[in-house]
Structure formats: C-alpha cells, structure tokens
Amino acid sequence: MALRPIISLPDSRLRLVSKPVTTFDHEMLALFDDMLETMYEAPGIGLAAIQLGIDKRMVTLDLAKRDDSPPQPLFLVNPEIVWSSPELSTYEEGCLSIPDFYEDVERPARVRVRWQDRQGAVQEMEADGLLATALQHEIDHINGVLFIDHISRLKRERVIRKFAKAARREGGREPDAR
Ligand code: NI
C-alpha cells in the first residue's frame, strides 16, 4: 500500500469521465489498497480513482468513524445509480479535491446503486442518509461532476476562482493549462 497525492481544483482531470473497469486483476486490487489508505490518511469518507488522477470507474467509501468503530470499507467498481427517490435531503458536503470548502447540497434522499465488487461480481444495495449522499457524490466524480456543480452559480464561480488564484500563486502556472 502507498499514499498517493490527491489532485484538487483547478486540475482539469477532475472533469474527465472515467472509463469502465473490465479487468479485475492484481493491479486493480493494488490501486484499491492505495485509494483506501490515501482516503483514511486524508482523512475522508469517500474517494474516487480520478481524485488520484486515474480515470477508472473505481470508488472507495467508509462511513465508520475512524476512532470509535472498526473500519467498514466499501470497494465499488463501475458503480451506477439505478433508482433515486423523489424525496430529497440536504447534507453539508465537502471534497478532498476542494479542501476546506463546505456547502449544503440537496440530493435524492435514497438511492439504489449497482456495482461490481473486487472479484467482478455484481452487487446492489439501497442506501439512505449520509451513505446515499456519499454514494452520489462519488459516482458524480467518475462522471466528471463535482459537488460544487450542485450549488448556486455564484458560489461555484467564487470557489473556482479562489482555487485558480491559489494555484497561480503556488506554481506560477496553471495546472490545468492545455
Ligand atoms: Ni469529492
């Protein structure tokens, strides 16, 4: 296992649509190990492979609080939302790729998610509460969508500008320049 750097705004790779995983091999397992370790270290409750700059449809999640309950990691390959409830709920969201920025986001309160596990077997579950929000947040990532896309345009543009400015100050160049 190894920690890997998490990419952040304004890195344009965060906008890539990740590719389906078709090979369930040792390399994929090793990447999952690195994702989990990096997520725990951050610390965060969810991480998509693209946040490590890797455009594969892979997500790790663990909602267990690190200190007071044993880890309960979830490893999702090619996850998709197959149903979402008409009722909505609001959670304050944050993102390891948008450090120190939090905002309320309204999303479907319950979702049914289908994915493949690390062996390639198809799994399905229905989730509510924080898990429903976290699943939607991470599945957004593999489709190039960020939680700031669900907030007001004014707030979104403000945070994007702030991160772009910080990147210019740090590197003297735009990480997302093409
Ligand atoms: Ni995120």
Image (spheres, helix red, strand yellow):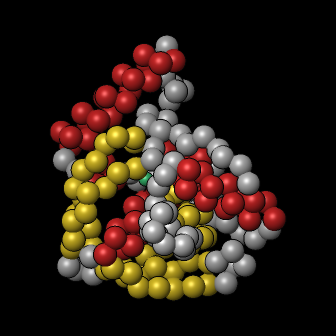
Q: In which quarter of the image is the C terminus?
A: top right
Task: Report the label total.
Answer: 0
Q: Nearer the viewer, residue 150 or 167?
A: 167
Q: Quadrant of the N terminus?
A: bottom right
Q: Is residue 134 above or below residue 15?
A: below
Q: In this view, does 175 lie above or below 52?
A: above
Residue 135: x and y in percent read 43, 69
Q: Nearer the viewer, residue 165 or 99?
A: 99
Name the residue rendered at 60%, 63% in the picture: 58
Residue found farthest to the top:
172
Dividing the picture into quadrants, the one containing residue 159 is: top left
Q: Is residue 6 above or below residue 107?
A: above
Q: Nearer the viewer, residue 173 or 5?
A: 5
Residue 114: x and y in percent read 51, 80
Residue 62: x and y in percent read 50, 67
**Observer able to see residue 172:** yes
Q: Tell whether 5 sits left or right of 167.
A: right
**Observer able to see residue 16:** no
Q: Which of 45 and 117 is in front in this view?
A: 45
Q: Tell whether 145 sits left or right of 7.
A: left
Q: Tell whether 40 sits left or right of 151.
A: right
Name the residue rendered at 48%, 22% in the picture: 174
Residue 141: x and y in percent read 46, 56
Q: Is residue 126 above or below residue 166?
A: below
Name the residue rendered at 31%, 55% in the picture: 93
Residue found farthest to the right:
26
Name the residue rendered at 57%, 85% in the picture: 123
